[in-house]
Amino acid sequence: MHILQPKHTKLKPEEVERLISELNISLVQLPKIRINDPALPEGCNVGDVIRIERKTEEGKKSFYYRVISV
């Protein structure tokens, strides 16, 4: 992982369920990330949900979510 690359974390199934219910969406409505993306952590499969942690200039953390697709 490169130092400038945001942190990518695979969510556990219970975290995915909580996220989907909080956002009131289905899994297919999440933005996609390709399975061959080099930023993905080891052991990811199609259908897993990834949390991307980015830091703003003020030092705050913001989270983005993607579902892995083919």
Image (cartoon, rainbow, N blue to C red):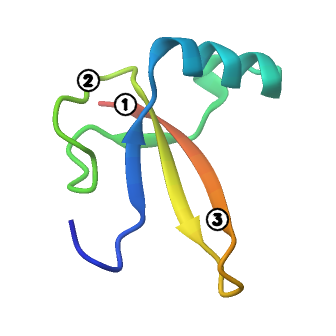
How far apart are the two marked residues, 2 and 3, measured between alpha carbons? Answer: 26 Å
The answer to which quarter of the image holds residue 34 is top left
Q: Which residue position holds label 1?
A: 69
Q: In the image, 15: left or right of 68? A: right
Asked which secondary structure carries label 2, the reply is loop
Point out which mark residue 45 bears: 2
Question: Residue at coordinates 21% horizontally, 65% vertically from top-left?
Answer: 1
- Dot placed on the residue nearer the N-terminal end, 2 or 3: 2
Q: Mark 1: which amino acid?
A: Ser
Graded by Cα atoms within 10 Å as few (under 14), some (14 to 19) or many (20 or more), the crowding at tag 2 reads some
Q: Mark 3: which amino acid?
A: Lys
Asked which secondary structure carries label 3, the reply is strand
Q: In the image, 2: left or right of 56? A: left
Q: In the image, 27: left or right of 45? A: right
Counting from the top left corner in percent of width and height, residue 11 is at: 45, 28
Counting from the top left corner in percent of width and height, residue 63 is at: 62, 53
Point out which mark residue 61 bears: 3
Question: Residue at coordinates 80% horizontally, 24% vertically from top-left?
Answer: 22
- Dot placed on the residue nearer the N-terminal end, 1 or 2: 2
Q: Mark 2: which amino acid?
A: Asn
